[in-house]
Image: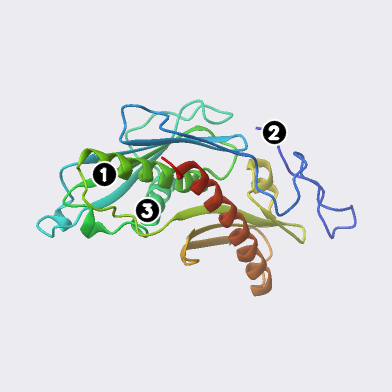
Amino acid sequence: MASNAGKKDGSGIGPLIRSDGRMPDECREIKVHTDYIQTALGSCLFEMGNTRVLCTATTEDSVPPHKRGSGEGWVTAEYSMLPGSGTSRVPRSRSRSGRTMEIQRLIGRSMRAVVDLSLLGERTLYIDCDVLQADGGTRCASITGGYLAVCRAVDTLMKTGGLEKSPLIGTVAAVSVGIIGTTPILDLDYGEDVEADVDMNVVMTGQGRFVEVQGTAEGEPFKKSEMNKMIALAEKGINQLFEIQARHLDGS
């Protein structure tokens, strides 16, 4: 993928330049295609710039052992990168890497934060997120698109009598932020992620609460003031994502 890495602000070279012309506080162009897969209860092809993730939501009338007999359901996720999703082939494998397990657990936690399991019944809701093309932010795109797939699945179950009441109790979305030089930037692509001195993934609900804040310094540790700036920037981006989600769910 093309790099968006630019000149480092504060380095004496000049202001930060993003190769796609975005301002530091702008998300990439977002495209949403709901009901992309007709055979799934709910689906969404979610695009953030050149990152494309296909999210589907399906159910099974069973629950994990720790939920059996509880009257509650369960929500879980699987995540994978397809072989042609990156610049080099990603091999198909039955085993899951540590990174893959981390991401799919995060997706599952994010969805459970906004689903009332007691209203789901003793069924498991699966969210499958398959990365068709990776250019940074795949876990964030999976969460934001995965929520749309869940909404469409719930809508289908309500219409067919599978659910009497919607188990959705909120909204959830995610975005990446980082620092290049001294400039906080929103929604990093792959080139920016490689270049960043700090990168962070933020997952929030529509009530302004956090599911996860995961930040890493690649070199010099970052300050609390810098962290606060990144979180504020992430909140701005996530609010934009909530607006996009709402537009694609209104009237569905």
Q: Please name the residue shown 18% across and 51% down the image.
A: 64
Label 3: which secondary element: helix
Whether label 1 touches label 3, CB < 8 Å: no
Q: Residues within 10 Å of mark 1 (few under 14, many from 20)?
A: some
Residue at point 65%, 56% (across, down): 178
Identify residue type, mark 2: Ala
Numbered circle sitting on residue 158? 1
SS at circle 1? helix
As drawn, 180 above or below 5: below
| Residue 127 numbered mark, or none | none
Point out residue 12 in the picture as x, y percentages from the top left corner. Answer: 90, 57
The label on residue 111 is 3
Q: Of label 1 and label 2, which has the lower sequence position? A: 2
In the shown orientation, is residue 163 left or right of residue 176?
Answer: left
Q: Amino acid at mark 3?
A: Met
Q: Earlier in the sequence, mark 1 or mark 3?
A: 3
Query: For the residue carrying disc 2, how many other residues have a C-alpha within 10 Å: few (<14), some (14-19), or many (20+)?
Result: few
Whole-number angstrom distance, CA of label 3 to CA of label 2: 31 Å
Residue nearest the viewer, comparing 10 with 151: 151
Q: Nearer the viewer, residue 65 or 162?
A: 162
Judging by the rendered image, the residue that carries numbered circle 2 is 2
Left or right: 49 with respect to 131? right
**Mark 3 against mark 2, which lies toward the viewer?**
3
Quadrant location of the C terminus in the rendered image: top left
How crowded is the residue under tag 3: few (<14 C-alpha within 10 Å), some, or many (20+)? many
Quadrant position of the N terminus in the picture? top right
The Cα atoms of the two marked residues, 1 and 2, are separated by 43 Å
